[in-house]
Image: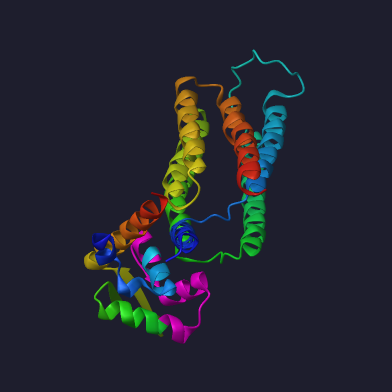
Amino acid sequence: MEKQEIYSELHSIRNLMERSAKFISLSGLSGIMAGVYALIGAGIAYLLVYGQSLTMDYRENLLQEAELLWNLFFVALAVLILSIGTGILLTLRKANKNNQKVWNPISKKLLFSMLVPLLTGGLLILILFYRGYYGVIAPTCLIFYGLALVGASNFTFEDVKWLGLMELILGIFAALIPGYGLLFWTIGFGLLHIIYGTIMHFKYDK
Amino acid sequence: MKTTLANFDKAFENRVRLQIMSILVANDNYDFNSLKELLEVTDGNLASHLKALEKEAYINVYKSFLGRKPNTSYAASEKGKIAFLKHLESLENLIKLQKT
């Protein structure tokens, strides 16, 4: 066998092992967009809670008015739906370009490993919301999202694991320092997503 | 020289078979249609190579039904995994030999 032939054989083995075991059509751009939506959402939430007076030292607002709560809830929901929608759309587009089927055994495993912690966390957050434990909602969001990412990273790029670990650390800190939920939420879902998305975009989408 | 050639597996001489094996080693199991999509080969071609690997007892075949549709999935056997690794080693050795 020629040397060149062996190399191409080894290359094709490596390529197939990776493509068959990892879902590589996640788009970096969707991470950036999710971050931008989160920043906008956080901005709106900040205005809703603290009014027009842009002071950072007033931290004793008691979230009690039902109307405000529902408004915050809808802002969060809008951010979630927009992010997931954009993510699905851009992933479909990238999969098309990569010639990778979106619905394959790996993407199913990826989705399953993400949905278990996300749905559990989502339900828990709804219960916390209902019971009035508003202070722990932001850390809970971050922690369950982090767990979902770490679990999902087995089936996609390694980098997702690092994003997940960062979210987990932020979540723990958010739980330690109550009252700054929105700030941690903004860093975790806004800033980290934008940084991660930019890295992914230049690393894999180019 | 002889030892490397001894490890060179005839069952993997065909590229599609080697490719099937690399997918099955990297995953717990894989179904027929997904293999076909990934390898971009025809039904008949894939089926005949899978048969050959099955005959060597390198892969296990699991048949089941998804609703009414038959669904066949494949997994690498212990013997197949060892054979695959040996084959990779012999490829590596070949490269090393040609370097010196």
Q: Is residue B19 above or below residue A109?
A: below
Residue that protrudes farthest toward the front in the picture: B100
Res. B22 visible in picture: yes
Direction from residue B42 to residue B53 in the image, left or right:
left
Colour style of the rendered protein structure? rainbow
Q: Position of residue A10 (x, y in %)?
A: 44, 59
Residue that protrudes farthest toward the right in the picture: A52
| Magenta stretch holds residue B34 | yes
Q: Position of residue A116 (x, y in %)?
A: 42, 51
Magenta highlight: main SS: helix
Q: Is residue A148 above or below residue B25?
A: above
Res. B64 visible in picture: no
**Rendered residue at 69%/44% (across/down):** A33
Residue A129 vs residue B65, the one in the foreground = B65
Residue that protrudes farthest toward the top in the picture: A57
**Rendered residue at 62%/61% (across/down):** A98
Residue B66 vs residue B6, the one in the foreground = B6
Residue A205 vs residue B51, the one in the foreground = B51
Q: Which image quadrant is residue A189 in?
A: top right
Q: Which image quadrant is residue A172 in?
A: top left
Direction from residue A152 to residue A186 in the image, left or right:
right
Q: Position of residue A118 (x, y in %)?
A: 47, 47
Image quadrant in which the N terminus of chain B is located: bottom left
**Rendered residue at 43%/41% (across/down):** A147
Q: How many marks?
A: 0
Q: Position of residue B44 (x, y in %)?
A: 45, 87
Q: Range of the magenta residues?
A: B23-46
| Magenta stretch holds residue A160 | no
